[in-house]
Image (spheres, rainbow, N blue to C red):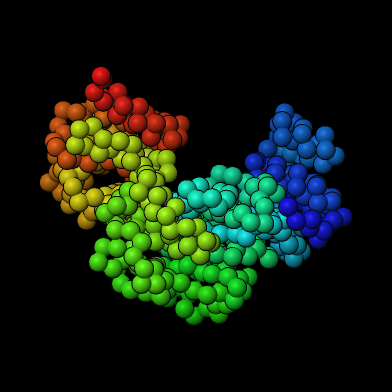
Amino acid sequence: MLSYTGLEDQDVLVLGLAKSGYEAAKLLNKLGAKVVVNDGKDLSQDSHAKDLEQMGIEVVGGQHPLSLLDKNPIIFKNPGIPYSVPILQEAQKRNLKILTEVELSYLVSEAPIIGVTGTNGKTTVTSLIGDMFQKSREVGRLSGNIGYVASKVAQEAAPEDYLITELSSFQLLGIDTYRPHIAIITNIYSAHLDYHETLENYQNAKKNIYKNQTEDDYLICNYHQRHLIESESLKARTYYFSTQQEVDGIYIEDDYIVFQGFRIIHVDDVVLPGEHNLENVLAAVLAALLAGVPVRAIIDSLITFSGIEHRLQYIGANKTNKYYNDSKATNTLATQFALNSFEQPIIWLCGGLDRGNGFDELAPYMTNVRVMIAFGETQDKFVKLGSSQGKYVIRATNVEDAVDKVQEIIEPNDIVLLSPACASWDQYNTFEERGQKFIDRFRAHLPQF
């Protein structure tokens, strides 16, 4: 960990406790800052709050008093807190610096950073790069939006390691000097407009990932969205990835992944399914190569990495049928990717919380769907969708019942895909619980020896 002194004796307000706020407050205290932690909820019984108070850190819960701004503190806010809350609106009026916790990770990290952002695919790319490092003798430490607080992981990283950080638009909106050595933008589509208000604001937040890069750094972008960055003043060496044509970077040629004329692996040997995952694979391979991961380790990863939990996760086969858990597909865009990932006939398990929207935009992606099994509050909507496309639709009470009904109609080489296109809260506490129920029921139907 670098002995950063820039925050020593500085007044700092950590806004939002949670996991990242807790770790940020501890680190700031270690760096010699005068820290106050504030959260809108009552913290009187919170174990983390009590822990911080024992360190001499002031904790204010239950409200956001504007008096906390009187010392003109630097603010480290939880990424999920919108800038529209009164205390942040007042902070902006006073021109106070508002940062997110990932900025701290950069300030103290001795290791170079691989930063990964994008609307879709960033978790898969981050996880895949981490797996490639794990298959080698190099050390890559996962951090950020993937579930490991970046400022905590950064303290443990050695100079010869890499910090592999998944970055959300919310986190990137609050950086100042943050500079990844290798930056990846998987893609940028319209998302989180309730937070960013406009597509342009959202895009600009994502673009912050490369704003501090220098000629010594690398930027990896989707070639088919190059128009988003071509007008920018880029200092980093820019590489592209494409599944459709040769580019300055990494691409698919004659069904091989190719970088600078070197064939790395045939696409049929890559375990992750789907065109969108091929894009994720290309981005991850290029980043790993630039970071010095041996090609052998990269190939070992590509032929074994079956995806992250609940996101188009291959969970196994029963006879000639492969089962995929895509419970994290809580919207239609994610399910479009999933349906588009297979050329074999699909038994599609779908449904969940009804948010009032329709599902007609899924119709063009249903060509390979042989049977639909619908459950949850949106069951009627999926029955209507299936009928409009001439598909055989079965009703089920829940995911477990859906897997049971699969056994009655499955045919050789069918793909069984749970990709609900809906949130889980009508029947399950989380999408993880929904996905685990799917996995458990799949295993219950495996032959017993």
Q: Which residue is drawn at 47% across and 67% down?
A: 220
**Residue 294 location in percent, x, y?**
47, 58
Q: Which residue is drawn at 66% across and 51% down?
A: 157
Extreme-top residue of the structure: 449
Q: Can residue 166 be seen in this view?
A: yes
Q: Residue at x 26, y 54 (%)?
A: 268
**Residue 232 location in percent, x, y?**
52, 78
Name the image quarter holding residue 19.
top right
Name the image quarter holding residue 310.
top left
Extreme-right residue of the structure: 9
Left or right of 210, for residue 186: left
Left or right of 327, for residue 199: right
Please tell me which residue lies in front, 372 or 325: 325
Left or right of 208, for residue 309: left
**Residue 171 location in percent, x, y?**
60, 56
**Residue 405 location in percent, x, y?**
21, 28
Q: Can residue 332 be seen in this view?
A: no
Left or right of 220, for residue 236: right
- Quadrant for the C terminus, please: top left
Q: Residue at x 30, y 36 (%)?
A: 316
Tell me: residue 186, above or below residue 239: above
Please tell me which residue lies in front, 214 or 359: 214
Q: How many labels does the image show?
A: 0
